[in-house]
Image: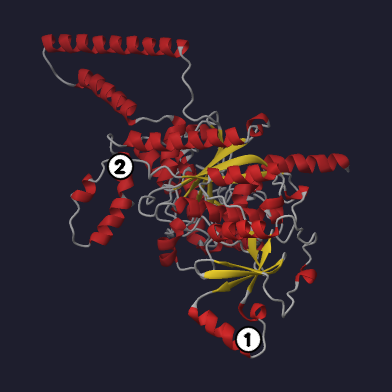
Amino acid sequence: KLDCCLNLTINKIYRICILLNIPVMRGQWFIDGTWQPLEEEESNLIEQEHLNRFKGQQLQESFDMEVSKPVDGKEAIHSLKLSRNHVDWHSVDEVYLYSDATTSKIARTVTQKLGFSKASSSGTRLHRGYVEEATLEDKPPQTSHIVFVVHGIGQKMDQGRIIKNTAMMRDTARKIEEKYFSNLATHVEFLPVEWRSKLTLDGDTVDSITPDKVRGLRDMLNSSAMDIMYYTSPLYRDELVKGLQQELNRLYTLFCSRNPEFEEKGGKVSIVSHSLGCVITYDIMTGWNPVRLYEQLLQKEEEEELEDRWMSYEEQRLLEELYITKQRLREIEERLRELKASTISKPPVLKFKVENFFCMGSPLAVFLALRGIRPGNSGSQDHILPRTICNRLLNIFHPTDPVAYRLEPLILKHYSNISPVQIHWYNTANPLPYEHMKPSFLNPTKEPTSVTDSESVSTVPSPTTSPVMVRRHYGESITNIGKASILGAASIGKGLGGMLFSRFGRSSTTTPQTLETGKDGTEGDDKKATTVGTPPLPHSSSGFLEPTVELEHRIDFELREGLVESRYWSAVTSHTAYWSSLDIALFLLTFMYKHDQEDTDKSNLDTI
């Protein structure tokens, strides 16, 4: 098909293949039926022989299969011997490939003695050119959004895996595009970012100190989990960061050079990172550096030492002078840095702004918590990732993924009691848009027997520092809470601004009869709220929250567990199961096509 495509289409296909490190071969001779191309070496030999023998003669103008049926009894007018096969030409457009293996020769001899022709018995019909002619409609849609797919640990162990994983994600995305976004004239392209194999790090030092016993297991750990140790090492961390940063910029520059209209038409860039790749990508975008953190801690310790430690007058005077001198030195260094920055404009770390940052199976929350990030009073994403750097942060995880952690409780503490947003199944009919889904309460595990008035008054938390409660498994029914749990929810209802079960939280002295009635009502509401992807309206009586402080946008999104899924088996497989998920493909495209879909709907509405 490439043989008759427009040059523009060929160039675009060629550019994408080169960018993805895929070998490009021109298909000239194809096998009848399957229309698979022959190997390039054989195809070139057949093409050269065909042109030498039949140059000037015309092929049939139509590719209709009815006129290309073989005619038995025709003698070959030309033959070509290949290494393991030979080719016979019965006419300019009747070409057959035969195997020269011994078994094929015997089968061919037997069938010919039975009266069958050589071509019909063991020959494979070849066609010069593809079955369909290219048209203007074959031109690929305009790429409006590129997605860099960043791998995590283990790439050294299985080189090229990220290319295969990206191909799986691209294939599932194509299926979703055809089903849900076929009305859009734009296109999302997924590009793998392989940053690990080019790094030298310690060379083979770690391999040389590895014992020989259970060598296979040790080599697997050296090629996978060792990446985490490299990243926490002050010696090799910068090499990992620069490796990913340079590869992202290289791919973006290469893509723009081959698609100059991308930037001109306001093309957008998103990043999908997996596992440790999420942490490295985050540090590149934010410019986080452990050296600066160490300097801040050192300065803080010096100040505390001056305040708390007993010392002689002379020692105190000398330490004060040293502190003042260091402070003065820092001020001079800062002024010099600002002066350099004003005269030389420092290029951005990344050559593009990130529209969406998707984390899959991410331990980023643990790294941020260990760096001292604590919940605040604002529901803004800026608390952990400023929107000037990245427009939207989304954390995707499977509920049994042992590597994944939640990000929302690092912004607002009481979101540890709120379940992540459930990602819709790809075949859900009319799913509720994610921005319309209200927070729902995670159930407590322990059921207190009673709550006294004194306890309810003394344990009232502040609205901004809600208590972290022991949680059940995600997705368990709220109707399992029971009478004592409702009493417990009522006791903290005031502290959460009345957002939890407001019908029970009016007073901690509510009678048991009233509570029983309220409980039945809650169960009734919950039964109505079992439709997949369509939670009920945000009434507190149905288990949905109306907190005083909410997140501007939800960040944690959770895949749904299968009905017959084993949690123990999922804990082993879930961390690497994101790539081929149709649910994730729909989720990614929903956010990347969001503005295009809104513009299309608006234009359709204006037309109507």
Render colour scheme? secondary structure
Q: Residue 200 appears in which quarter of the rendering?
A: top left
How many dots with numbers? 2
Q: Earlier in the sequence, mark 1 or mark 2?
A: 1
- The answer, for residue 591, to whether it is visible in the render is no
> Are the residues tagged 1 and 2 within 8 Å (C-beta)?
no
Q: Looking at the image, is mark 1 or mark 2 nearer the viewer?
A: 1
Q: Residue lying furthest right in this view?
A: 608
- The answer, for residue 354, to whether it is visible in the render is yes
Foreground pick, 22 / 127: 127
Where residue 449 appears, as percent x and y from the top left, is: 43, 60
Which residue position is annotated with label 1?
112
The residue located at (55%, 74%) in the rendering is: 99
Foreground pick, 442 / 108: 108
The residue located at (19%, 49%) in the rendering is: 208
Q: Residue 245, which numbered label?
A: none
Amino acid marked by disc 1: Gln
| Placement of the C terminus among the 4 image quadrants | top right
| Placement of the N terminus among the 4 image quadrants | bottom right
- CA gap, disc 1 and disc 2: 68 Å
Residue 506 located left or right of residue 226: right
Vertical relation: 182 (above or below) 80: above
Where residue 455 appears, as percent x and y from the top left, is: 42, 48
Foreground pick, 453 / 400: 400
Where residue 551 appears, as percent x and y from the top left, is: 56, 39
Q: Residue 230, which numbered label?
A: 2
Q: Secondary structure at mark 1?
A: helix
